[in-house]
Amino acid sequence: MSSSSMSRSAGSDGDSGGVVVAGAGAEHRREKRRLSNRESARRSRLRKQQHLDELVQEVARLQADNARIAARAGDIAGQYVRVEQENTVLRARAAELGDRLRSVNEVLRVVEDFSGVAMDIQEEGPPDDPLLRPWQIPCPAAAIAGAHLLQY
């Protein structure tokens, strides 16, 4: 063995005085393994960074979706408040008109009783008026289910 290969193998093995047989091959394998580990670590860091970038993009996308949905929910809540206010006004108006109708009917009954002339007294709206029950479907479910048959 030459003196340069002896010093290389001796220094790399940690033996300061002994000569290692086939030290150059082991040193070459160690160096190759070290380079392979470095490359593997580099690829691992790149994969980690790529995954992190993807997660950051997903967070941004989800935050944008969340903001859009929150804005839509706010719009719907505002519409609901407006509809509720309108319904409150309409209910008050309906109650007022009902009171007026009862008053007019009472006056007509008094006039009818004193004059003897038959008056056409209109009673309050029919009890089955679907506009008075907006939470109920005005027609039975069977009629709705059979309605599509008429389209053909």
Image (cartoon, helix red, strand yellow):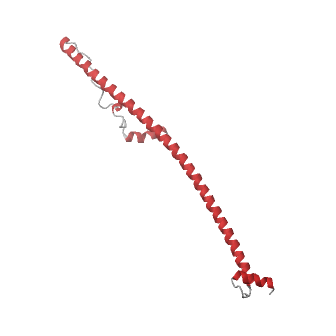
Q: Is residue 150 visible?
A: no
Q: Name the residue: 37% across, 31% down.
A: 87
Say how many tags the image has.
0
Q: Is residue 87 left or right of residue 54?
A: left
- Residue 143: image location, x then y, percent: 39, 39
The part of the image, by quadrant, that contains residue 112 is top left
- Residue 93: image location, x then y, percent: 34, 25
Q: Quadrant of the N terminus?
A: bottom right
Asked if residue 72 is positioned above or below residue 4 in the image, the reply reads above
Asked if residue 38 is positioned above or below residue 127 in the image, the reply reads below
Camera-nearest residue between 88 and 28:
28
Q: Is residue 28 left or right of residue 142?
A: right
Camera-nearest residue between 134 and 93:
93
Camera-nearest residue between 36 and 107:
36
- Residue 76: image location, x then y, percent: 46, 38
Q: Is residue 108 left or right of residue 40?
A: left
